[in-house]
Image: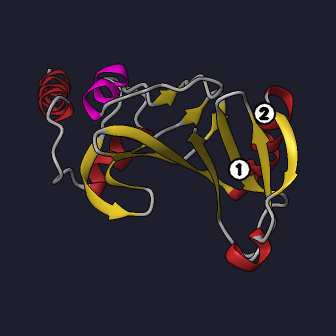
């Protein structure tokens, strides 16, 4: 009986916190949500289309995720919404960040364990048109970036799994 009461209390707290998109969400709670089998933290996105999201539309579309949205001025945008995830389009992943400028989606960054680099590249090769290595990428990021194209977007990740690193990133920008 005590276990049932504890589960109900934790579920109530998680549900309340889940529905409040604030800048103060603690990392330990994000880790709990991503690692918990109680929550669906998978993300499926049509990377061939322009989603045209506003921040509110993103939060509504991915209401099963525990998104943290905050101001973050950079070349990528003026706001970011991020969370821990378990997978992106079937490829095991760690976290995802959506960048916005003037309340419009601009850029996506997804982080994967380096051991999943081969799975990520297979997914990209199977679903998108590889166009080659990004010129000057080795000088900018220390490694060559492969580029895949769709009719409306560009995806990029390392050509080879980075040595001495524990993560690899995928970027998605819509034009």
The answer to whether 13 is drawn above or below residue 131 in the figure is above
Q: Quadrant of residue 81?
A: top left
Protein image colouring: secondary structure
Instruction: State left or right for residue 70 relative to residue 164.
Output: left
Is 172 part of what is drawn in magenta?
no
Find residue 31 and report its horizontal and vertical position in percent: 37, 49
Mark 2 or mark 1, which has the lower sequence index?
A: 2
Image quarter (top left, top right, bottom left or bottom right) of the C terminus: top right
Q: Quadrant of residue 78?
A: bottom left
Q: Is residue 163 visible?
A: no
Q: In the image, which residues are magenta?
A: 55-62
Q: Which residue is mark 2?
A: 123
Element assignment for label 1? strand
Find residue 155 and report its horizontal and vertical position in percent: 68, 43
Mark 2 or 1, closer to the camera? 1
Residue at position x 68%, y 41% in the image: 154
Counting labels gives: 2
Instruction: State left or right for residue 70 relative to residue 8.
Output: right
Find residue 139 and report its horizontal and vertical position in percent: 75, 79
Element assignment for label 2? helix
Query: In 3D space, how far apart are the residues under numbered discs 2 and 1 (Cα atoms)?
Result: 12 Å
Q: Quadrant of residue 141?
A: bottom right
Residue at position x 31%, y 31% in the image: 54
- Crowd tier of the residue under label 2, counting other residues whose Cα lies within 10 Å: few below 14, some 14–19, many 20 or above: some
- Crowd tier of the residue under label 1, counting other residues whose Cα lies within 10 Å: few below 14, some 14–19, many 20 or above: many
Q: Is residue 113 visible?
A: yes
Residue at position x 74%, y 77% in the image: 142
The residue lying toward the viewer, choosing from 12 and 97, is: 97
Say the numbered circle drawn on residue 76.
none
Say the numbered circle drawn on residue 156.
1
């Amino acid at each position: 009986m005590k276990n049932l009461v504890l589960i109900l209390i934790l579920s109530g707290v998680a549900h309340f916190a889940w529905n409040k998109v604030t800048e103060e969400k603690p990392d330990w709670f994000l880790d709990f949500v991503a690692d918990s089998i109680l929550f669906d933290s998978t993300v499926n996105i049509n990377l061939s289309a322009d989603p045209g999201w506003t921040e509110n539309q993103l939060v509504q579309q991915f209401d099963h995720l525990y998104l943290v949205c905050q101001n973050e001025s950079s070349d990528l945008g003026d706001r970011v919404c991020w969370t821990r995830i378990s997978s992106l389009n079937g490829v095991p992943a760690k976290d995802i960040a959506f960048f916005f400028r003037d309340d419009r989606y601009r850029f996506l960054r997804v982080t994967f364990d380096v051991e999943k680099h081969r799975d990520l590249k297979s997914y990209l090769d199977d679903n998108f048109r590889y166009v080659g290595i990004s010129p000057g990428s080795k000088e900018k990021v220390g490694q060559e970036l492969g580029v895949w194209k769709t009719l409306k977007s560009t995806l990029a990740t390392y050509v080879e799994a980075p040595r001495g690193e524990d993560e690899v990133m995928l970027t998605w920008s819509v034009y």
